[in-house]
Amino acid sequence: MAASSASKLFRAGRSLLGGLKDPNGSIGMSKDLPRSYLFSQQQRTFIQMRTNLKVVDNSGAKRVMCIQALKGKRGARLGDMIVASVKEAQPGGKVKKGQVVYGVVVRAAMQRGRSDGSEIKFDDNAVVLVNKQGEPIGTRVFGPVPHELRKKKHVKILSLAEHIA
């Protein structure tokens, strides 16, 4: 019983420390961890082709899939524009399933450094749908939105947001 609770405590401590120390105190990965645990740690990457994103406005779409990131070869980050296909939509909304739309990434699971030295990351990948001119299709934005969108010239999205992080 004590051995199993110690291993659970080690797993929790390892997730907090990022796997830097094993129980012996040396730097590196532990050899006795199960392989499935090592693969369960999700790698946070850019928003790239075929990434599913949650839609956090009232445009009628629930989920979109990224077709192309419009900036950079590696993918999109906070505040970048993407081209996406609507995968799930509410009936009677402004956008329909299968429609190709533009969107601005407002939440990304990949962490991003701020100018004051802190880092910000969210639990999910989320997007606000916009037209070609960059104006939001919906009239409300749900959930937190980072203030870095101001630098990317998406002030209208910030004005519609409930909470600015």
Image: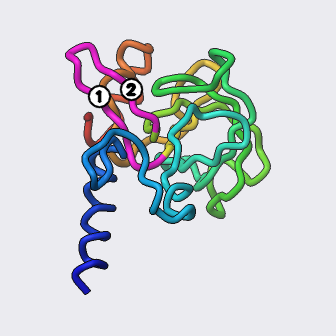
The stretch of residues the image draws in magenta is 110-124
Magenta stretch, main secondary structure, is loop
- Residue occupying the far right of the picture: 98
Q: How many residues crowd mark 1 within 10 Å: few (<14), some (14–19), many (20+)? A: few
Is residue 5 depicted above or below 28 in this figure? below
Scheme of colours in the image: rainbow
The answer to which of 28 and 58 lies nearer the viewer is 28
- x, y (%) of residue 140? 41, 44
The answer to which of 41 and 158 lies nearer the viewer is 41
Residue under pointer 1? 119
Q: Residue at x 62, y 54 (%)?
A: 93
Q: Residue at x 46, y 48 (%)?
A: 124
Q: How many residues crowd mark 2 within 10 Å: few (<14), some (14–19), many (20+)? A: some
Q: Which residue is drawn at 79% across and 50% down?
A: 98
From the image, which quarter does the C terminus lie in?
top left
In contact (CB < 8 Å): disc 1 and disc 2: yes
Residue under pointer 2? 112
From the image, which quarter does the N terminus lie in?
bottom left
User: What element does badge 1 sit on?
Assistant: strand
- x, y (%) of residue 84? 70, 38
* Callout 1 amino acid: Glu
Q: Does the stretch in magenta take in 33? A: no
- Upstream in the sequence, badge 1 or badge 2? 2
